[in-house]
Image: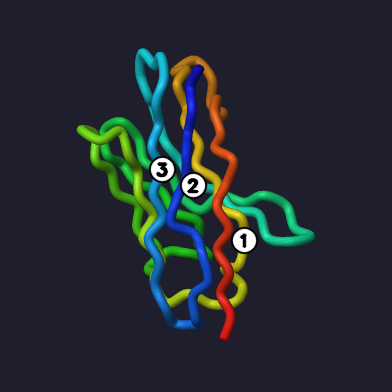
Amino acid sequence: QVQLVESGGGLVQPGGSLILSCTISGSIFRINRMGWYRQAPGKQRELVGTVTSGGRLNYADSVKGRFTISRDNAKSTVYLEMNSLQPEDTAVYYCSADTDIRTSGMDYWGKGTLVTVSS
């Protein structure tokens, strides 16, 4: 079974920073992309950003300049560094993995980690 596990969520004050981690394990032949998504209460899930196997990065306009995705391939881990956090960033953050080059969607998802931005 392929498993993605997020960690690092919690409570942070406006203007603060937080780093989320996602570790993937299981029987995986390749990972084409890994991504971060989020879902705020009462809203649709939205893209945060993705990183390809070649290291190419893509971010949603709402987080450009504030969030950074990085990888540690030896640890099978992807990170999301979040800076200048605002209450609007409050959401459950999900890690995802695209393992099928023939399809454009994500194939596996973590259970999510809650980030709450509040004073």
The structure residue drawn at horizontal position 39% and vertical position 26%, both measured from the top left corner, is 25
Quadrant of image for the C terminus: bottom right
Which residue position is annotated with label 3? 22
**For discs 3 and 2, the disc positioned in front in the rendered view:** 3
In the figure, residue 65 lies in which quadrant? bottom left
Q: In the rendered view, tell whether residue 101 sits above or below residue 64.
A: above
Residue 107 image offset from top left, x and y in percent: 55, 25
Q: In the rendered view, tell whether residue 47 sits above or below residue 66.
A: above
Disc 1 residue crowd, few under 14, some 14–19, many 20+, Cα 10 Å = many
Q: Are dots 1 and 2 in contact, CB under 8 Å? A: no
Q: Residue furthest right?
A: 42
Left or right of residue 117: residue 82: left
Marked residue nearer the N-terminal end (1 or 2): 2
Camera-nearest residue between 85 and 103: 85
Residue 56 image offset from top left, x and y in percent: 31, 41
The structure residue drawn at horizontal position 43% and vertical position 57%, both measured from the top left corner, is 8
Return the mark for residue 36: 2
Camera-nearest residue between 53 and 86: 86
Marked residue nearer the N-terminal end (3 or 2): 3
> Disc 2 residue type?
Trp
> Disc 3 residue type?
Cys
Camera-nearest residue between 53 and 73: 73
Give the Cα distance between marks 3 and 1: 16 Å
